[in-house]
Image (cartoon, rainbow, N blue to C red):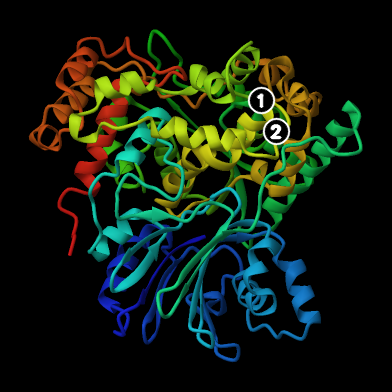
């Protein structure tokens, strides 16, 4: 798990090593164990390493295979690297290290652009083929690992974070109006390739990108999710058994592939609790678990300790729980915003940031339950969408999911940023694309392949890697997701959602954990805004920088500020927080950034 960056000059000049150093400095927290760089004329690579597999210097990066004429920077974990290594050794390849990084080098040489198809795991990598003078980049199927890029007339740059690209300079920091519409409609989700900044793009999940030395650029998908029923029908029992076995294997694999201990972020919900149970079932000893809680408000509890404590008692884990007062949340909020590669509205971003800080002092790798709700239909809006009797797929999704309809967006946004309904146009095409039998097949496919990438997957990566902590998400094992996508939606949505997981958990977890209402890693202070939190948001949105930017209409701001607790989105986000968060992110990450 690491931070990567690089540049390919297209103007005949050598790579700008000063820019590489600037990007590496911005990535230090993602990889505190080692830093290295590599250059080959027009090509420059930078890498910051968090050592998880093969802790020796042999797996430091950039990794160069002089015999094959290849160099690589890689962020992530390849869970099937041992099997791939055996296959490649049978083809005659010789290895000089014991980790997963070198396997990617040999896999490229053996299979070329088919290489990413062979990888099981989370990854973003850039590979330089000196023989072909080609730069090849790839990202995992669900975008678990980030990969941003920027292109100017003189060259192409990439990095694990937006901040690293900004540190190198030359980025167009104008706001992308299409991305802005996505951001405020989809709970801060901006589907790839766009970002909120016009000059920064991101490689879509399950895609590769090839740039030739003459500037030719080709992008292609290498995987798609099939959400149709199999030709041979399965019984309910067969589906449940197959899902149980595939999840058990994924959890075990995500725990075994490391040369350091692996713990669990235990929220107290079904998903993370099930990870603990399956790890214990597979024989893991001395299991480490970690929980975080916040102050209550009259409307909502700030922790789920009553449930996580039951799981700890059942399995005797070595447990740490952290209670964070609101004063500390407010004090540390700017740091968390600095760690966001793109603006994030989810209130649990700050929770993950503060939890990761504590956990990173004791352990380097954790498993987390993200993805289970999207894969197995766990959110409250899914049954509501399913129950809609009429309307297109888009209309039924929008009614229960969109943060704002387009009419409200136009009432909110300044005239310089107004435009057509970009989000509906994009999502209508994705929802109607072939390969999804029913309404909920299309909704869940959209969620797991597009929406989940920015919320919550990006949030987990950014907030843990800010502290050099690797978070693994076994519910997004691609073979498990492929299996679940073909399972009938009515089976997944039974009993309020996640029925296969609830059935699996019977006897493994206390019934109180299985049958409890769905939790959302609560931080009530960012949902029910008052006191010092309200003061911060008001000061931000009335600041000179905010007024000069002209993003928001004053009458809409006045409405929110007059009753900050009364304006929530359909999925219970605070609308005032959304506006303030974007402005805070722009002020801290973009205003004053180098543009030349």
Earlier-in-chain disc, 1 versus 2: 2
Disc 2, SS? helix
Residue 587 location, quadrant: top left
Which residue bears the numbered disc 1? 439
Which residue bears the numbered disc 2? 274
Q: Is 202 on the left-hand or right-hand side of 487? A: left
Q: Is residue 226 above or below residue 420?
A: below
Comparing labels 1 and 2, the label whose residue is closer to the camera: 1
Q: Is residue 21 above or below residue 496?
A: below
Q: Residue 520 appears at what percent x and percent y?
A: 51, 24
* Res 447 seen here: no
**How would you rate the neighbour count of disc 2 (Cα within 10 Å): few for under 14, some for 14-19, many for 20 or more?**
many
Along the viewing direction, whichever of 343 and 114 lies nearer the viewer: 114
Along the viewing direction, whichever of 335 and 80 lies nearer the viewer: 80
Q: Residue 321 appears at what percent x and percent y?
A: 50, 33
Q: Is 67 on the left-hand or right-hand side of 23? A: right
- Count every numbered label the image shows and give the total: 2
Query: What's the mark number on residue 496?
Result: none
């Amino acid at each position: 798990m690491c931070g990567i960056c690089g540049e390919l000059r297209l103007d005949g000049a050598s790579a700008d090593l000063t820019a590489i150093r600037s990007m590496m400095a911005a990535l230090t927290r993602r990889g505190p164990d080692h830093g290295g760089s590599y250059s080959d004329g027009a090509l420059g690579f930078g890498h910051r390493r968090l050592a998880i597999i093969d802790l020796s210097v042999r797996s430091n990066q950039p990794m160069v295979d002089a015999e094959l004429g290849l160099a690589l920077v890689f962020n992530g974990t390849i869970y099937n690297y041992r099997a791939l290594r055996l296959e490649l050794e049978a083809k005659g390849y010789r290895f000089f290290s014991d980790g997963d990084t070198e396997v990617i080098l040999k896999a490229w040489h053996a299979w070329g652009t088919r290489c990413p198809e062979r990888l099981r795991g989370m990854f973003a990598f850039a590979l330089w083929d000196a023989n072909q003078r080609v730069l090849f980049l790839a990202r995992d199927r669900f975008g678990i690992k980030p990969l941003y890029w920027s292109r100017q007339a003189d060259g192409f740059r990439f990095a694990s974070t937006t901040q690293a690209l900004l540190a190198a300079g030359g980025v167009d920091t104008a706001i992308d109006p299409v991305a802005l519409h996505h951001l405020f409609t989809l709970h801060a989700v901006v589907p790839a390739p766009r970002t909120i900044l016009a000059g920064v793009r991101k490689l879509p999940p399950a895609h590769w990108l090839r740039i030739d030395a003459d500037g030719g650029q080709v992008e292609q998908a290498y995987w798609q999710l099939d959400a149709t029923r199999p030709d041979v029908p399965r019984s309910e029992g067969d589906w449940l058994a197959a899902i149980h076995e595939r999840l058990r294997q994924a959890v075990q694999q995500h725990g075994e592939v490391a040369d350091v201990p692996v713990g669990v972020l235990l929220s107290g919900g079904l998903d993370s609790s099930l990870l603990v149970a399956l790890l214990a079932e597979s024989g893991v000893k001395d299991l480490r678990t970690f929980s975080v809680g916040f102050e209550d408000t009259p409307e909502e509890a700030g922790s789920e300790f009553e449930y996580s404590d039951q799981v700890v008692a059942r399995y005797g884990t070595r447990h740490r729980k952290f209670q964070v007062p609101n004063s500390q949340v407010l004090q540390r909020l700017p740091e968390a915003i600095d760690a966001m590669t793109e603006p994030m509205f989810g209130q649990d971003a700050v929770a993950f940031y503060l939890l990761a800080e504590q956990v990173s002092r004791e352990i380097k790798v954790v498993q987390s339950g993200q993805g289970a709700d999207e894969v197995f239909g766990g959110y409250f809006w899914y049954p509501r969408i399913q129950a809609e009797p009429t309307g297109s797929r888009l209309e039924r999704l929008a009614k229960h999911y969109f943060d704002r309809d387009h009419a409200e967006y136009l009432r909110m946004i300044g005239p310089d940023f107004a435009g057509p309904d970009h989000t509906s146009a994009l999502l209508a095409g994705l929802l109607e694309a072939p390969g999804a039998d029913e309404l909920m097949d299309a909704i869940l496919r959209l969620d797991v392949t597009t929406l989940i990438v920015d919320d919550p997957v990006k949030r987990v990566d950014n907030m843990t890697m800010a502290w050099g902590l690797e978070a693994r998400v076994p519910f997004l094992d691609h073979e498990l997701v492929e299996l679940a996508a073909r399972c009938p939606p009515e089976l997944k949505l039974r009993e309020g959602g996640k029925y296969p997981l609830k059935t699996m958990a019977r006897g493994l977890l206390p019934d109180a954990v299985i049958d409890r209402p769905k939790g959302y890693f609560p931080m009530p202070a960012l949902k029910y805004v008052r006191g010092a939190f309200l003061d911060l948001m008001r000061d931000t949105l009335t600041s000179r920088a905010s007024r000069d930017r002209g993003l928001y209409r004053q009458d809409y701001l006045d409405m929110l500020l007059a009753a900050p607790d009364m304006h929530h989105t359909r999925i219970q986000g605070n609308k005032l927080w959304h506006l303030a968060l974007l402005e805070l992110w722009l002020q801290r990450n973009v205003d004053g950034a180098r543009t030349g």
